[in-house]
Amino acid sequence: MSVIIDPKDLIIAPDSNQSSAIYVREQQGKYQRIRRNIAIVLMTLFAILPWLTVGGEQAILIDLTALQLHVFGATLFPQDFPIVAGFFMVAAFALFFVTTWLGRVWCGFLCPQTHWLFIFVWLEEKIEGSRNQRIKLDKQAMSLAKTTKKTLKHLSWGIVSFLTATTFLTYFVPPITLYSDLVSWQWSGLITFWVAFFAVCTYGNAGWLREKMCLHMCPYARFQSVMFDHDTYVVAYDTQRGESRGPRKRKQDPKELGLGDCIDCNLCVEVCPVGIDIRHGLQYECISCGACADACDQTMSRFNYPEKLISFTSEAQLAGGITHLFRAKIIGYAIACVLIVVAMGVYWGARVPAELSVLRDRNVLYRVNNDDLIENSFQLKILNKLPYATSFQVSAAGIDGIHVSITEPVMVQSGELTSQALTLTADPEDIKLKVTPITLTITSEGQEPVIITQESRFFSE
Ligand code: SF4
Ligand code: SF4
């Protein structure tokens, strides 16, 4: 079998005409079914996750005002940035892992851009008709029928875009608040702006930009070839089996005509959302959606030829060998994912539910007050990482009879950082050293108190 994929030499198809409109033909088939099922699961999750509550809190909420991220009962603060950074690192390495193994399946089956594009194409097809009908419609002069169809299409796109934008906003604003404010026309200017912004982005991306977003704006399309190797699965056309291509009658024997299995029906090009011809080899525009494979399988079964003239395969397999799953790169990416997850687990395990910071007054080491007692001044900062407001009692140890100026419990709201001036006072007779190590402690109220300590120093004469 001939090899048609050279991962280091991804090409731009000679006939890929990116400047003209692409009329995508809707295609049914195995890969389309897989994508649709994945879309149903992902979109259901996207829509319902903000409605779930855990312990009375929204399951997932990005509270930009309080700078908190609520994830299934856990609250993350800016200080927990390592967890968020770890999450993105795991996501990146998982993407590298999947790309090396299965090529651009993220683009074809998981990327929101692709799912929304297919939804918009589906609406287009339902309202304006099949690919040929749409081409004809666009060539027609403006008429009532054409205006009605175009209006309905853009209206349906607008509704989907608006619903997408409001659903996205429910990750930032509780859905009950967002929708009840919408019904009573009480959206603030800021909410209105962001809903309009995300709706326009969705409409523009899936309705107009479409494949141009993948071709010119998404950086992933540019560097994915670095992860490809001879065992990476890609959508590929079997040149040796397909060529020479050419039309024939169903009952004619292609061998007698000197033809391969490709009947040159052009379906694989018509269903391609990025408008390329996979028969020219692997191209960087290809998002591995498998629509051309579905279309070609359909043609092959109509002609009683074996399927998979276009299929998900590897260069190694096309060359007659086997695809190796366990490669150094893949194992390396998997190990990196596991190590980062373990590091996140360790960080989470060591995470304290409150933070105490004690800063000395840098201007004066100590003071002698009117009662001849020694005073040291500090700035006390308490961060409450608990998911509820609580009070903290402040105490100090290290010198007999040391007195703390903050005698009342300090109330700190969930996620809030409170700063208070603190003065420690001690009798010179109880101080043995010029610099005495002391321990400051905050103890939260409640049945299971949180106790946090911080070391400092007490200066005297
Ligand atoms: S060439 Fe095939 S797999 Fe690639 S984007 Fe086009 S239809 Fe999808
Ligand atoms: S769909 Fe299959 S048979 Fe038709 S042109 Fe494409 S490769 Fe050839």
Image (spheres, helix red, strand yellow):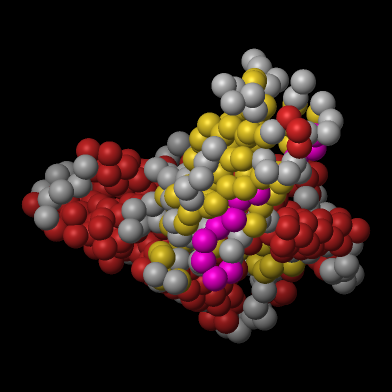
Which is nearer the eye, 180 or 327?
Answer: 180
Residue extending farthest top? 363
- Look at 49% across and 60% down and name the residue there: 387
Which is nearer the eye, 107 or 186?
Answer: 186
Which of the 4 image quarters holds residue 121?
A: bottom left
Q: Quadrant of the C terminus?
A: top right
Q: Quadrant of the N terminus?
A: bottom right
Which is nearer the eye, 31 or 440?
Answer: 440
Q: Indicate the position of residue 75 as horizontal and vertical percent values.
A: 53, 57
121 on left or right of 216: left
- Look at 59% across and 40% down and name the residue there: 404
Up-down relation of residue 416 to residue 152 (above or below): above
Residue extending farthest left? 144
Q: Which residues are magenta?
A: 436-448
Count all numbered tags in the image, as a single digit.
0
52 on left or right of 128: right
| Overall secondary structure of the magenta section | strand
Up-down relation of residue 55 to residue 107 (above or below): below
Q: Indicate the position of residue 159 as horizontal and vertical percent values.
A: 24, 57
Please say whether residue 6 is one of the residues in the magenta stretch: no
Q: Is residue 201 in sight in this rendering? A: yes
Which of the 4 image quarters holds residue 402?
A: top right
